[in-house]
Image (cartoon, rainbow, N blue to C red):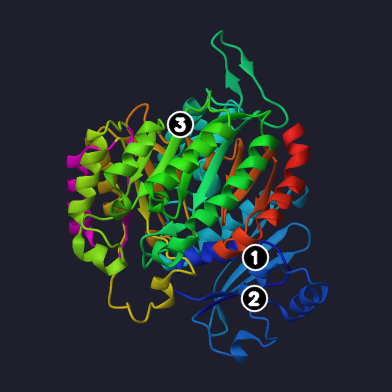
Amino acid sequence: MITVQLNRQNFEYDVHSLVKAFYPEENVQIAYAPEALEENLAEGSLSQTEKEMVRGSGKTPEEETQPSLKLVISFIGEGGIRVQFLKQGNVELEDETTADWRLGRKEVKNELKRLLYRMLSAYTGQKLPWGNLTGIRPTKIPMALLEQGWKNSDIAQYMRDTYYTSNEKTALAISIANKERHILQNLHTNLIRENGDGTKTEHKGVPEGYSLYVGIPFCPSICLYCSFSSSPIHLWKDQVDAYLDALCREIDYASEAFQRKILDTVYIGGGTPTTLEPYQMDRLLTKLENSFCLDQVQEFTVEAGRPDSITREKLEVLRDHGISRISINPQTMNQKTLDFIGRKHTVEQTVEMFCLARELGFDNINMDLIVGLPGEEKPEVEHTLQEIVRLDPDSLTVHSLAVKRAARLRLFREEHKEMTMTNNREIMDMTSEYAAKSGLFPYYMYRQKNMAGNFENVGYAKAGKEGIYNILIMEEVQSILALGAGASTKLVWAKDRIERIENVKDIKNYIERIDEMIERKKAGLYEYSQS
């Protein structure tokens, strides 16, 4: 166990995340100096996340289980930060820096993370590929600087100096940011738009465009690593039509509320949308077509996902409704791994369904794979890449496994502790090389907590086949209207103001409380929809 003691309630989440990045297998807990802990608890100023990180017993670490490492972070006066590494009560490393609080919280946080990163790196002998960056959207940094007119070389120097990012990851982030910015130029966002005559138009206020997400929370089975809001379809077979009834009511309200906005992209995800029967999928798509103006939609994605949920009839429904982009996701092309993680399909089914989709005319097919699955080392990942290259998809999303708290693989980690979960730079470089061989180049990226190898998820695509919705959800430059159980609407009022409206995750609750879900949207959407 590693304990970090703070003398003030400041930057707990950032400190916890950075220490965890160096020690992913360790239990990292935040402890306040006794007087600070008592003050924070008395004021009720700790969030639920912070409470989970705080020891909270009132005892010092030495009075409980002896930690393997203790860090003491002290905020001194108005401008000093000191970090001490203690081993069995003695100081092994100590350093401090000054941070001018008058420059703002962000600058102080960056100074603290730089100091902490340098000391953790010196103590462990490690250098992290993303430096001290702990957020999930590293491309937002170069995107913002590009908007301000910075040159790529200046952005690279800034990222290396400020966040200690590696040369490779710095270049990846900047190249993706440039690609994203080019793709988003033709959408209705709050980005500065470059006009054909050399002038620029800066959008101020609420973006006029939005994207639509529709959630189908059913899956053929629940994968061992999964923590998404989804349920086995066989348990809900008799309730799917009732779910669609509730969803259609939410569609009725939402389409009316957003009738003054311009719809840029539509994404039907889950779960696995193709767990719907053909008549149910036809009903949903017809409802969306009759409710929303799709005249300016540039991308309509249905995540077919699991090959065992796909049939010719379902693909024909998608084709007949003009769906422009689908995903067929193997995750791995190793049957042993598929069986272990609970995906009830075969490698042969993946190939069969992909070829069927091509036969039916789909010319924008994405495939997902996961690096770091239990038992898979470099040879297994390379086999998957070789098989995918043969299929020649239009885009490929490479996920680094992130085992979240709710996933069964984490809950039963003792049962599966003999299984290795490996990801490293060599494997990630190999995925990039195979993508490039197929004419697929990076266009979007995001990170997650507890990610294998502390790497990232990268989307690769052929020119003109990039997943626009994927970029929009990451860059937060327009609103996402989200419908269905577990869906989270994200309202982008401006670059510095984002609000969320959450639907309940439980399917039964969503069906029974659909009036409440609509009222939640009414409360949050009225002012936005009029702007």
Q: Amino acid at mark 2?
A: Val
Q: Considering the numbered disc 3 on the image, is that residue within a helix, a strand or a loop?
A: strand
Q: Amino acid at mark 3?
A: Glu
| Highlighted magenta segment, given as a residue range | 364-393
x and y, in percent, of residue 82 in the image? 65, 65
Q: Considering the numbered disc 1 on the image, is that residue within a helix, a strand or a loop?
A: helix
The residue singled out by tag 1 in the image is 12
Find the distance from the CA under tag 1 to the CA under tag 2. 9 Å
Q: Is residue 273 above or below residue 207?
A: below
Residue at x-position 36% and y-position 31%: 465
Is residue 385 something one can see in this rendering?
Answer: no
Snapshot quadrant of residue 65: bottom right
Relative horizontal placement of residue 424, taking residue 448 as reference (left or right): left
Q: Residues within 10 Å of mark 2 (few under 14, many from 20)?
A: many
Q: Nearer the viewer, residue 447 or 384?
A: 384
Label 2 near label 1: C-beta < 8 Å? yes
Q: Residues within 10 Å of mark 3 (few under 14, many from 20)?
A: many
